Image (tube, helix red, strand yellow):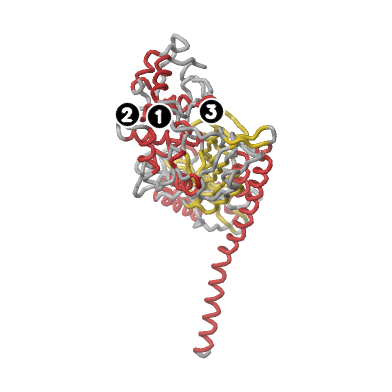
Amino acid sequence: MSRFTFAILFAAAAALIDAQAQAPAHADEQRDAALYARIDAIFADYALDQHVPGLVYGIVADGKLVYVRGLGVQDLQTNRPVTPDSLFRIASMTKAFTALTLLKLRDDGRLQLDAPAETYVPEMKNWKYPTDDSPRIRVRDLLNHSAGLVTDDPWGDRQTPLPEAAFTQLLRGGVPFSNAPGVTMEYSNLGYALLGRIISNVSGRPFADTITSTLMRPLGMTSSGFVADAAPAERRAQGYHWADNAWTLEPTMAHGAFGAMGGVQTSAVDYAKWVGYLLSAWPPRDGADTGPVKRATVRELAQGSNFAQLRKRLGHSGADSCRQASAYGMGMNAAVDCELGLTLSHGGGYPGYGSHVLLLPDMGVGLFAFTNRSYSGSATPVWDAAMVLSKGGYLKRRATPVSSDVATAYRAAGNIYQQGDIAVAADQLAMNFLLDRDAAGWRRDLAGLKEKVGACDTASPLSAKGALAGEFVWRCEHGQVTGTLLLTPTLPPRIQTLDLQQKAP
């Protein structure tokens, strides 16, 4: 073969390899475009059916805003279109900002979650509790909506502009209770307004300033804030109320004492930075923790009270989906879904606005939507969009890294199968292992399995289930073998269980 011919063949082979490498990426782009088109249709139908003047929605993946779309108009006077930079009030989606700022103050040693809230809000000390055996409200109870305060939608929304002095007078007079603290979860805007007062008193600055400097500015959310009118008018989405087949402009509510429960105004571009930051806290890992709040602290937003409930998945797939175990965390509803894994979500309903956010920490993906129609919470299209991504193969669970201990145990498991004898890994076994099944029994079991499936590729990938457990599938001559292994809570860890089974056809 001449050098010229060889060069041509080499170039052709290289081109083929390059084309094969690019093909999957191109296929993913085509898949994503098709999925985004379906999601566009979902939100377009929602806007039409719900009489929404304008909305914006976005998808965040791996820390980036990978897709964003505005529909309709910011205001009906100028018909200025909604863009990713349009500013919407996000109502109760504010609560996560309040909760994480408070947790940061806890990290800094400024307060304690299990301390009575009256430690930081003296006006609460004279409150009359509903029963003689009622415990004092803790800061944690306010975070988890388990303080016994009554559900106050939509009254609480209209308190946003309440002056701080008037809020102080309200607190001094006491409030009625719906339940004794600590016995059930009941959503309370007043409770999060109290958290705002705690932030102000502990930090020595107004809560809006503390939240902004703690979270928004470090994350580059330069267009976000609590004073809606401070933003340029041409960027603001005006809020509307729909009634009697007509839209009515909602007056802009000023910033005030209740802003910590629902007063934030933001854009899709800014909010995507917040979503990406929250998702970056998962999974737990080594490496630099650059903040503005520690990853472990961010993950506390998913930690709720013990008042869990079963609920249907939100959206149109809820009727035929698995039920979720749900509890209110800290500024987020935490639920475990059979397809989506851990979910953190929250809606926002407000005079003139509605919104929803859904985080999928196991997948590294978040979705959100803002609208400018009163209480048009967009949970249904957001969750429907998530299911489109799930069914379309877009969502991939983040793999748990395989620890060195599990990797060592996995190699031992492969050696055990190949040699047909547990004794070859005696130094890797925990003290219980041969007490639960003796060596002779293991030899018989291994021989019987080998007779069915033959030799196996015991170097197949292992899926970690934490740092001390794993599961795997071996491809063999006459079938497949599924296996699990679990290590002991000792140093060094040892194999306490190993299970090998022929995979059912």
Q: Is residue 283 visible?
A: no
Name the N-terminal-most of marks 2 and 1.
1
Secondary structure found at label 3: loop
Residue 321 appears in view: yes
User: Is label 3 in contact with label 1 (beta carbons under 8 Å)?
Assistant: no
Between the residue at mark 2 and the residue at mark 1, the CA separation in whole angstroms equals 10 Å
Q: Which kind of residue does numbered mark 3 sit on?
A: Ala
Mark-to-mark CA distance, 3 and 1? 25 Å
Q: Which residue is mark 1?
A: 196
Other residues around mark 1 within 10 Å, as few (<14) / some (14–19) / many (≥20): many
State the image coordinates of residue 149 (x, y, percent, origin top left).
49, 20
Tell me the element at label 2: helix
* Residue for badge 3: 308
Mark 2 or mark 3, earlier in chain: 2
Name the element at disc 1: helix
Mark 3 against mark 1, which lies toward the viewer? Answer: 1
- Is mark 2 in CB contact (under 8 Å) with mark 1? no
Q: Is residue 78 above or below residue 374?
A: below
In front of the other: 115 or 381: 381
Residue 459: image x %, image y %?
49, 57
Name the residue rendered at 57%, 69% in the picture. Answer: 20
Farthest residue to the front: give it: 77
Q: Dot 3: within a 10 Å radius of its alpha carbon, few (fewer than 14), some, or many (20 or more) residues?
A: some
Q: Nearer the viewer, mark 2 or mark 3?
A: 2
In the picture, the disc for residue 77 is none
What's the distance in space between the residues labelled 2 and 3, CA to CA? Answer: 31 Å
Q: Which residue is mark 2?
A: 202
Q: Residue furthest top?
A: 132
Q: Nearer the viewer, residue 182 or 78?
A: 78
Quadrant in which residue 322 is drawn: top right
Q: Is 171 positioned to the left or the right of 52 in the image?
A: left
